[in-house]
Amino acid sequence: MCLSVPVKLIAVTTEDALMRTGKVSLGDIHKTISLAFVPDAKPGDYVLVHVGFAISIIDEREAQFVFDYLEFERNS
Amino acid sequence: MNEFKRDAPSCGLPLSEAGIVLLAHGGGGKSMRQLLKGVVRKHFKSPFLSTQHDSAVLPMGETRIAFTTDTYVVRPIFFPGGDIGKLAIYGTVNDLAMSGARPLYLSVGLILEEGFPMESLDLIVGSMEEAAQQCGVEIVTGDTKVVERGKGDGIFINTSGVGRIEHSFQIGPQAVRHGDAVIVSGDLGRHGISIMAAREGLEFETTLQSDCAPLSPLVQDLLESGIEIHCLRDLTRGGLASALNEIAETACCSIAIEEPQITVTPEVQGVCELLGLDPLYVANEGRMVIFVPQAQASRTIEVLRRHAPGKQASWVGKVTQDPRKQVSIRSRVGIARILDLLSGEQLPRIC
Amino acid sequence: MALKFIDEYRDAKVASLYSARISEMTTRPWRIMEVCGGQTHSIVKYGIDQLLPPEITLVHGPGCPVCVTSVFMIDSAIELAAQPEVILCSFGDMLRVPGSHKDLLTVKAEGGDIRTVYSPLDCLKITRANPDRQVVFFAVGFETTAPANAMAAYLAKREGIKNFSMLVSQVLVPPAVETILSSSASKIDGLLAPGHVCAIVGFESYTALSQKYRVPIVVTGFEPVDILQGIALCVRQLENGRYEVENQYTRSVRSEGNPSAQKMIDEVFEVTNKTWRGLGNIDASGLSLSMAYRDLDAERRFNLSVKSTEKPNKETTGCQSGLILQGVIKPPQCPQFGKLCHPDRPLGPTMVSSEGACSAYFRYRGREGAGHE
């Protein structure tokens, strides 16, 4: 359920709070999506997009957790 | 005209239950096979139809010819990298090439809707002649019909083609052998995705163009290079997965492919991720799958890469002795799964 | 060019490291349920269950909003779509799901004006472009889709749009999870919670469930490596006798979820009882339009003749999707699987929806549904 895809926010295209939209890229294609639910997202951030809306900002530091965990387990 | 009617996906209900023609019946998947088996082949009994190949290879005195027909209904009619006219020429030329024939002559049938812009028609017909010249074929006969406004969706084009077989192979599923290498002539999915991008509703921006291209020069080069071609199939609706399933069924064999060996451009992958589509089922128009003895695989790839449409040719798998007679794919995490035919076309999904 | 935050979570080497780690840790049989259909899809597609030691059994939960949309709702959508003044907008997933007699695609072939949309905002575009028609949006989804669906209603009301309405079939995950955990038939030891639902609503609501049923709950993503790490974290807890809520999907999920999205859900929707196809009625497990938005409710605007006579687990004879959605059996254990029931002739929703467990098994494992090698 909930097919959501991580994309890169390239630019904010409309600044109105509710109608805030941004242009995102995924593998060289661009699409305009709604940023209404990620008011803190800024160009350069990666966001998770579901049905045309960004629903979460990806924490790039946390993204390493999956790989660091293996190291931790190996050493423990 | 309902803006979404053309791209609407299709239902998986069995033929008998639906009672009417559904879009799925033209989708290149299971429903289409049901229609062909249940209605078309119930009446059309020629043994030449049983080869189920892209063109029919017919004896003509001392020689053999290949004969094929195809009808083009693509929307939009002008898309990045081509138009319906160009497609109508390349598509039929490619079907002839899949028997290893040298394409020679084409016919063109136009069905035009009252009100269709003359300027568009002029562009399309001009594009067809340009494509024909590029392929070295002549358009030698044709027909034009006009239907009332509302009854024809702009333009439909049928092209039929004749080519000469200049080799001694029997190229088709019946020639596929255990151990054969399965080679794809390039990256997948560009045509289907660029068509989607050009349609309203999905609205993504891309510089991606259709991979629409003639394949006959590649096939001729393979033959002249002494490659023992067992089977060729151009990848159109239903993508690589459908083509492999059709061949496996006709040839009564199993095919195993490796996902890491499949080439997909970042643009195509991006759109597929966004919409939940699998690139293995997305349409192509200038790509083919080739079955050759494993010993000739490297040479085949070398020859293909001499041509622009073949620049990313790669080995993707092989024909195996798996008794289950199915197509399987080993994912990049190392486990194999079945690669089946879909019932209809793929649906963009939220789940 | 690698797709960032996607390709690295499909890495074969990392997957095999996790596979080895899980094998080392596991000393006893464990039954772990993944709730979300997208996770089921990933597990079956990538063969993740075949990377696990035999002691671990993965069972598949009801996390497919398409599968659990009631027959009544689909029949309502069908009735609406057949009306000449109506344009029915729907996500692609819903179009092939059978109602009592047919599906939306058949209605389309018969002349119904049904349009596939990628985003709920596309419906508003269609609405503005067709002022003389009534546009109905079949608003299906879990909490992940709820804010987006809510936004369509919010904007329609704000703009005073009169020819737009919504047929709402929103469901909530935690009550369904509780129903399954409390059922003695399910026998679940650990749970992988749906990552994208939690991105919206957070995961604080799972703490009580985890404690009450003494079950570790790991918020998990969707890529193969995410699922393997989720399983590893779950097994580590099980082997150590712990039962807590843990977050595997830390790059996308915070414990409080997404406050702006929650605010939109609270503005437009209210909690209601809901009938889940295959599971029956579950209290407080759905959303309906709140009082201020009730005039956008298609069920009120149109005089539908479809009646809600649906009984729990009423399904075409032989369909066991209810048991599958509860994780009691797996698709290959259903007697109809691959015989009377397959994607071309589905008996129930789990075979039709691309996220349904039965469909995933059939598509990737074939008629026998066994592991393929």
Image (cartoon, rainbow, N blue to C red):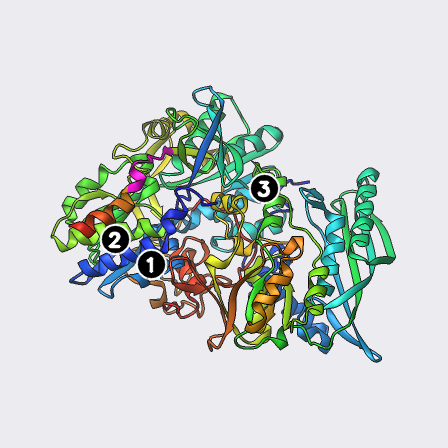
Give amino acid for label 1.
Answer: Ile
Subunit ID for the residue under disc 3? C
- C338 vs B175, nearest the viewer: B175
Q: Which mark is residue C48?
A: 1
* Distance between the alpha carbons at the discs numbered 1 and 3: 45 Å
Range drawn in magenta? A56-64
Find the residue positioned furthest to the right. B141
Instruction: Name the residue located 78 percent from the left edge and 56 percent from the top edge.
Output: B135
Of circles 3 and 2, which is in front?
2
Q: Are marks 3 and 2 on the same chain?
A: yes
Inspect the magenta stretch and tell me whether residue B177 lies in it: no
Residue occupied by mark 3: C83
Find the residue positioned furthest to the top. A16
Residue B96 position in % (x across, y down): 74, 65
Q: Which mark is residue C212?
A: none
Of circles 1 and 3, which is in front?
1
- A26 vs B42, nearest the viewer: A26
Give amino acid for label 3.
Answer: Gln
Asked if residue B214 can be seen in this view, the reply is yes
Horizontal placement of B111 versus C179: left or right?
right
The residue carrying pointer 2 sits among few (fewer than 14), some (14 to 19) or many (20 or more) residues within 10 Å by Cα, namely many
> Does residue C294 sit above or below C22 in this rendering?
above
Contact, mark 1 vs mark 2 (Cβ under 8 Å): yes
Give amino acid for label 2.
Answer: Ile
Q: Are marks 1 and 2 on the same chain?
A: yes
* Distance between the alpha carbons at the discs numbered 3 and 2: 48 Å
Residue occupied by mark 2: C231
Q: SS for tag 1?
A: helix
In the rendered structure, which disc, 3 or 2, sits on the residue that comes first in sequence? 3
